[in-house]
Amino acid sequence: MIVKISDYGGQNNSKFIEYEVSGLFPNQIKFLADNLNEETSVNEEGLIIKMYFEDRLYPFQSEVSKFRLNDFIAREEIEMTLFLSSFLEDM
């Protein structure tokens, strides 16, 4: 499984992060799309997950994140990979 952040920012007074998840089997994509509470869609690359955050929980809001953005993005990708891996254990 490969998780990459494809987009992030603000939309409709909410902060969001959009993740592209590739390297999954079709049954895993279906399981995640059917069981995650987040907004999901499927494209030719795999699964797209869009998560919305309250301002205080948005990981890219700090001043430090502006200077070390690549570190913050990498951490979010790793955290999402771990979350999805544990979620798939319930399959």
Image (cartoon, grey):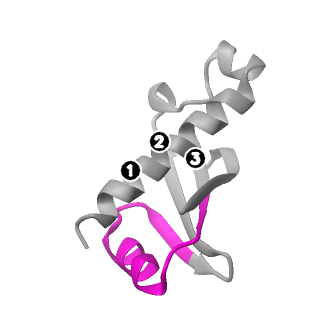
- CA–CA distance between discs 2 and 1? 6 Å
Q: What separation in Å lies between label 3 and label 1 (alpha carbons)?
A: 17 Å
The image quadrant where one finds the C terminus is bottom left
Asked if the magenta segment contains residue 17, the reply would be: no
Task: In the rendered view, tell whether residue 45 sits above or below residue 12.
Answer: below
- The residue identified by callout 3 is 16
Q: Which residues are magenta?
A: 19-41
Toward the viewer: 11 or 17? 17
Asked where in the image residue 87 lies, by quadrant, the reply is bottom left
The residue singled out by tag 1 in the image is: 83
* SS category of the residue bearing label 3: strand
Q: Which residue is mark 2?
A: 79
* Residue 37, horizontal then vertical, whole percent: 34, 62
> Of the residues tagged 2 and 3, which is closer to the observer?
2
Q: Are marks 2 and 1 in contact (CB under 8 Å)?
A: yes
State the CA–CA distance, disc 2 to disc 3.
15 Å
Q: Quadrant of residue 33?
A: bottom left
Question: What amino acid is labelled 3 in the image?
Answer: Phe
**Tag 2–tag 3 contact (CB < 8 Å):** no
Q: Tag 2: residue type? A: Glu
The residue positioned 45% from the left and 30% from the top of the image is 57
- Looking at numbered disc 1 in the image, what kind of residue is underneath it? Phe
In the foreground, 12 or 39: 39
